[in-house]
Image (cartoon, rainbow, N blue to C red):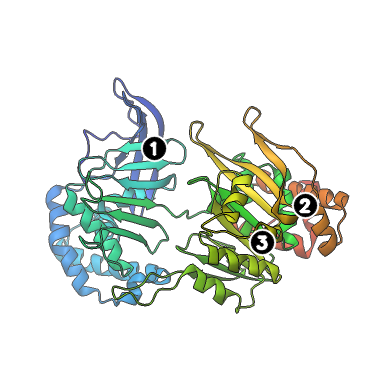
Amino acid sequence: MRTAGAVSHPSEPPKPGEKLIDAYSFDASGITVSVRIIKKDEFSPYYEVKMPVIEEGTKLYLLKTLKSALITEVKLDIAEIVDPKLAPIVRKKFEESSQRLLERQFPGLGEEKKKLLIAYLMHNTLGLGDLEAPMHDEMLEEIVINGASDPVWIFHKKHGWCKTNIRLDDEETIYDYAATIGRRVGKQINVLNPLMDAHLTSGDRVNATLFPISSSGNTITIRKFSKNPWTLPNLIQGKTISSEVAGLLWTCIQYELSLLVSGGTGSGKTSFLNALGCLFPPTQRVISIEDTRELTLPSFLQWVPLSTREPNAEGKGEITMLDLMVNSLRMRPDRIVVGEVRRQREAEIMFEAMHTGHAVYSTIHADNALETVSRLANPPINMPKTVLDTLSGIVVQFRHRKLGIRRTLEFAEVMKEGDLNLLYRWNIKTDKLTEVNTMSALVETLSLYAGLSGKEIKSDATEKAKVLDWMVENKYMDVDQVGRIVARYYAEPEYIMNLVDSKKPWNI
């Protein structure tokens, strides 16, 4: 890794012409990484990485000699390499072998230095080398390489797009990274196949392109998989949604109404879908269908995650989203979660599942509720508008790029014949979700299937909003924490409400 100029430690004062806007450190599988985010005389912030120094000669020996010996010594088959469940076992094998090799080659090496060199070997054997440091930063959403002539860029959750002090040596290095990622998941990227969509065993999504398709050089775009997925208390705390609307959505989910989450690219659709999944009852079976595994539901749920598969080099073995949706209906699901609906047949199966009594939750690209209906009712999806009323509600997520915030823009109920009744809309001036119309279709549906009157629906949603606010106050944000509280609420609502009303914590 080459650095653009000297790298400063977060504790150091900024240089003349620089303004320090953030500083923190984190652990990258045994290596302590320090980060400074500074503002220079440029439009974008600068993300500076500093790691413990390893001499160039030592690096060269580790990568040229010990790495080859390590790969030879550790015997693995392809199933062990690609199975994420076996990743800790594989890593342990490499670490033990690395320790033996280092002890033979450097018998007088101190423990701290040994740990550092083992971690460096792991980064360059099992990981992505120079990219491993940002890969371990939980504050990052994207890591992108635009070519060897440009520094690596990152998208920071707090500061947006930032240049980094990480540069890859040449186009061949970028290609090697892309090819390595592809081999680990059985994909190829070469002159004949210059585009690649793949994913790491950690769940991170990867897109790669080769020159001359990308005329400025080879590229890699990594969408990081959140290790701590968002829950509704997270979203309420971050002002993405109000507890009032979140409580109403919880009521819809408890009584098995189908919902669709829409929004533009990067608006947080999948994160919001994941947050809704924490509200599923533990007494039901959940089937999720995704192109790339992104959802993380509570560990105690009866949850079967399914993922699509692309064809092999001979064009065989493909498993499509449609295949999985058709198959899921034979698995006796109570809830079906679909990562994203893009095509007509997928939408047909999804609405057929709703018609046959399954609660379905999915995402779709659309900027508002009206556009969502328009996308569903027109090519290429082209669903008859008359069938859309099996869907109960549409939640629209919005990313305000200038302000750097994500908000729930709208929540609309779907009326007869697929018309919409907009219930809540975000007001940019007050930064609040404001009620704009009275519920109609939801009241009718919940009255028919749950025996709730309009007044009882409001009361139920208000009670759930109080539970969510209590979770926020007590910092119950983890997927399993939220899921267990929700499960206990379904089983013993009086017990949870007693804790909420008395403002007592719950020893989860």
Q: Quadrant of the C terminus?
A: bottom right
Where is residue 316 shown, x and y percent of the image? 35, 77
Say what secondary structure mark 1 lies in. strand
Look at the numbered discs 3 and 1 and tell me whether their residues touch, using CB distance below 8 Å. no
| Residue corresponding to mark 3 | 484
Discs 2, 1 touching: Cβ within 8 Å: no
Residue at image position (73%, 62%) is: 488
- Label 3 SS: helix
Comparing labels 3 and 1, the label whose residue is closer to the camera: 1
Write down the quadrant of residue 250 in the picture: bottom right
- Measured as percent of width and height from the top left, residue 133 is found at 32, 49
Residue 92 pos. (x, y %):
34, 68
Label 2: which residue?
499
The answer to whether residue 47 shows anywhere in this view is yes
Q: Is residue 69 above or below residue 480?
A: below
Task: Give neighbour class at mark 1: few <14, some 14-19, many 20+ (Cα, 10 Å).
Answer: many
Occupied quadrant, residue 433: top right
Q: Is residue 194 above or below residue 233?
A: below
Where does the image place residue 463, in percent across and percent down from the top left?
79, 50
